[in-house]
Amino acid sequence: MSPLFERLCQETLPQLDDRQYRDGGQWWFQEHELDVLGLTAEGLVAGECKFTSKPVTEDVLRDLERTTEHVQWSDT
């Protein structure tokens, strides 16, 4: 179920705000992974997908912030 839910989240990202996305999907490098990553003219939008009925803690946000520090991309 997790890969399907992650794909749904990736496809829904452009509908959640008014930004124009040039690209999107997921990202991973070594032990770092982002379930949702979107590229806009302003930069990156990153997210984590949690298929659970339990509240998400601030630890998830901290992990997301640490992981985004490892993302490198180029427009070329």
Image: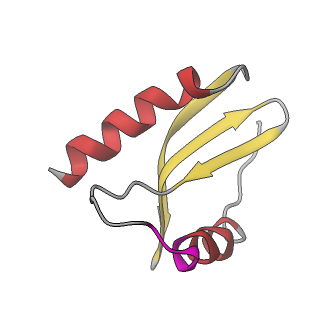
Viewer-side residue, 66 vs 30: 66
Q: How is the image coloured?
A: secondary structure
Q: Which residues are magenta?
A: 56-60
Residue 74's place in the image compared with 50, above or below, is above
Residue reaching furthest to the right: 42
Q: Main secondary structure of the magenta part?
A: helix
The percent coordinates of residue 25 (x first, y second) are 47, 40
- Please check the rendered image and state whether residue 24 is part of the magenta-colored stretch, yes or no: no
Horizontal relation, residue 49 to residue 65: left or right: left
Viewer-side residue, 61 vs 40: 61
Viewer-side residue, 75 vs 14: 14
The percent coordinates of residue 44 (x first, y second) are 72, 45
Residue located 27% across and 59% down the image: 53
Horizontal relation, residue 74 to residue 36: left or right: right
Tell me the quarter of the image containing the C terminus. Answer: top right
Residue reaching furthest to the left: 1
- Please check the rendered image and state whether residue 59 is part of the magenta-colored stretch, yes or no: yes
Q: Examine the image and state in which quarter residue 5 appears.
A: top left
